[in-house]
Image (spheres, rainbow, N blue to C red):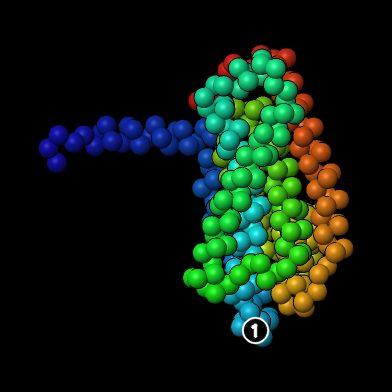
Amino acid sequence: MSGISFYRIGALALRYLYLLRSSRVRIVELAYWPTVQMILWGFITQYLARHSDLLNQAAGLLLSGVLLWDVLFRSQLGLSVVFFEELHARNLAQLLISPLRPIELILALMAVSLARTLIGVGIAVGLAIPFYGFNLFMLGLPLIGFFINLLLMGWAIGLLVAALVLRHGMGAESIAWAAIFALAPLCGIYYPIATLPDWLQPLAWILPASYMFEGMRAVLLDHAARLDYLLYALLLNIGYLGLGIGVFLATVHNARERGSLLQSGE
């Protein structure tokens, strides 16, 4: 074809392949998303195949799982993305030389994350009513506990991801998207924890979200509010959120000591 150089095309493609080869993160990402989806939907298929009597309730179980999962996802991403915007704009150093304290930055990120989550999930919950005839509020008062615990877990993960990116640079930004989905197969969003292999179940039970989704199914299938699940999740969240805040504050302090805040950005 006139004017087109396959030599230049090949050279440019080779450059991109070299970039791919030089980054383990990019290589892992190629297989990461298909693998997570395969594992997640594989467990869903196993669960429904073993409990065919639940098929008539599958829509409610799946929609509840999707909407509650979005609380966790949006809270984590809402905190991380807003923090990344400061890094992209190279504004973090200016913020931290002002009278603003790091803990105040954390609380502001949490407040914005809460607002973004309420808007995003609220719209989805509202649309589920006319589209599918499903009302998430049918879960009753336990829904408040589910929301709070998933929000806290999202914040804890978001702070850890933000600290990781602040420490290692924007090259680690993709972890914000990958971290939360790595936990999805373990949280029992669409199937009970008992569906997981025996060796994975102890790992699932150290995640607060696992208790929330088990509690959701208890409400929908057994019409029982598992207050013990809410308490276990809250205790775990207090520990994880404390860890997230501590790691984030330590990373900010370390960045100040190294003078790396001015180098953060694109």
Res. 184 image quadrant: bottom right
Determine the residue positioned at 87% across, 63% down: 228
At label 1, counting other C-alpha atoms closer than 10 Å, the crowd grade (few under 14, some 14-19, many 20 or more) is few
Report whether 80 appears left or right of 209.
left
Decide if residue 153 is on the left or right side of residue 168.
right
Mark 1 belongs to which amino acid? Ser
Residue 103 in picture, x, y percent from top left: 75, 29
Does the rendering let one see residue 62?
no
Q: Which residue is mark 1?
A: 52
Q: Residue at x 67, y 27 (%)?
A: 167
Where is residue 265, by image quadrant? top right
Q: Who's the residue at 54% across and 57% down the image? A: 123
Across and down, in percent, residue 35 comes to 58, 56
Between 164 and 24, the one lying in front of the other is 164
Task: Point out the image quarter for the N terminus.
Answer: top left
Residue drawn 70% across the image and 37% down it: 159
Picture coordinates of residue 238 (x, y %)? 83, 45
**Secondary element at tag 1:** helix
